[in-house]
Amino acid sequence: MSRSLPSHNLLKFTAIPLALGILSACGGGGGGSIGIADGGIRGTGSSVGPVSGFGSVFVNGVKFETRNIPNRSVDSNDDISSEDELEKGMILRVEGVWRPDNTGEAERLEYDDTFRGPVSDVILPDAANNTPGSFRMLGQTIRFDNRTVVRVGNGELTDGMTVRVSAWRTGDGYRASYVGSVTTGPDFPLELEGRIEEVNLDRFRIGTQWIRGGLNVGYPGDLTINDLVVGALVEVEGNFSSPGGAGGEIRAAEIRFADDRRFRGDEDEDIELSGPVQSLNLSGSTFLLNGVPVDFDSQTEFDDFSRSRIADGLLVQVEGEFRSGRVYAEEIELLEGNAEVEAAVQSADPSANELIVGGVTVRITNNTLIDSDDDITNNVFDADFLEVEGIERRDENDQVFLEALNIEIESAEDEFSLKGRLETGNYPLVTGTVKVLGVSLLYDEGAYTEVENDDDEDWRDCSVVSIDYEQSGNQFRALGIECEDDD
């Protein structure tokens, strides 16, 4: 078709505070089996997930006030010492309390880079084919996509850049939540984590990266040199053995067990975690989230998506209780978008955190990441044109809306695009009105001559479609309709 839903600007981010006040999470989840403690506290414990906004810290859909933390400090050994040095997308551990209205108080903040060093073999995401990008870093493969916040000098990740990465572990590597430019050196070394695959005297290998130990290596925490065996999951800081030796051996300065503790709670405490599902066992009703076992059952609420949809690699948020080294899930929420719109803004209602974009009702929550092209307004409610990815939902009146996960403020264009579920209806062969994401669009036979499907399937038989369209007076007219069921 003439133009799919592009994410051509997903790597061109400018930091914008999410100053939207106190937001209420949208969606079908009511509270499920999650108990509300005395005093209106929904949870007391740990919340670990990407930062989605500031003016306090937004993590896992909760606005955590940080005023009770002296100097709003962050516990980290990665040159991040205070809240104002954090970036959107960094995976942050917050210890504190949170309430049903999605506000809370933080008592402690903790951050740790997953990787730090030069990148190579960069493959950018392909929005047209809905495939993620990837790069190599210190012997590991790291994938990134439209949920990854990228903060690099020229806006596009390229081979040879030195970056810090905040990432989740997956079954076949890592998925980046944040990638940002950084300078490394003797006082701010390389960093990597992973499982040891080979040991050879005073050297060991993680992925394709060899690391050399020695008498001067520090072993913080519980790890000792005797723990450096095949299968051990470790974190290494150090520098290349020779100056300018990117791709060569790393001489370790410190080796410790990988920091899984950030993703674990104290016994019987409430916990919120987000990340990609791995090692799913449907018959056993369990999966791993960054190495932490998660159990779910018939009492677990799946927030506006079917439990049959859960799969390895799916980005989710889990809320539950931590017991005996496991999370017993009370609610699982989808964080993977299934619908998009790229169009002009018709109206904005800041008090309701709602916009009308190309006819689509868009609602903003505490989980929404908002970014902008250069030289465009930083306020989403002043924007003229937006690209929005999110989750298609229905409200209590059965009205369709798009719960925004990512919003990109863009320069205005004449042609619009959207992608979503085709609403049930009778669609005539030649001319008629098609309805997607609550928007009615006029079409004629010229709008569906570009069906790009291996079986030449008629879009009327599809569940999900993407549409290029334009506004004509008070109506919208489809320019091209494409089946997206294979995405």
Image: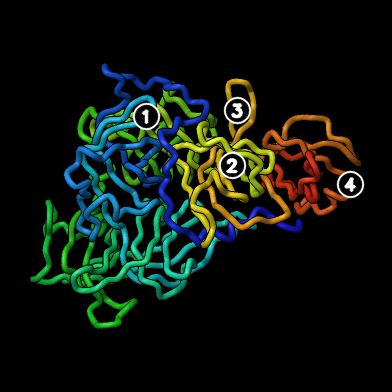
In percent of the image, x 75 and y 52: which residue is there? Answer: 453
Q: Earlier in the sequence, mark 2 or mark 4?
A: 2
**Amino acid type of disc 4?**
Glu
Q: Nearer the viewer, residue 397 or 319?
A: 397
Label 2: how many residues lie within 10 Å, few (<14), some (14-19) or many (20+)? some
Residue 100, how many percent across, how many down?
37, 24
Q: Secondary structure at mark 3?
A: strand
The answer to whether 345 appears left or right of 95 in the picture is right
Which circle's residue, 3 or 2, is located before the other in the chain? Answer: 2
Tag 1: amino acid: Ala
Horizontal and vertical percent for residue 334?
49, 37
Which corner quadrant of the image does residue 326 belong to? Answer: top left
The residue singled out by tag 4 in the image is 445
Alpha carbon distance from label 4 to label 1: 49 Å
The amino acid on which the numbered mark 3 sits, given as a three-letter code, is Arg
| Earlier-in-chain disc, 3 versus 4 | 3
Q: Earlier in the sequence, mark 2 or mark 1?
A: 1
Q: Kindly identify which numbered label has been placed on residue 151.
A: none
Asked whether disc 3 touches disc 1, contact meaning CB atoms under 8 Å apart, the reply is: no
Residue 451 image offset from top left, x and y in percent: 79, 51
Q: Nearer the viewer, mark 3 or mark 2?
A: 3
Circle 3 packing at 10 Å, graded few (<14), some (14-19), many (20+), is some
Q: Is residue 330 above or below residue 371?
A: above
Q: Position of residue 152 (x, y in %)?
A: 42, 66
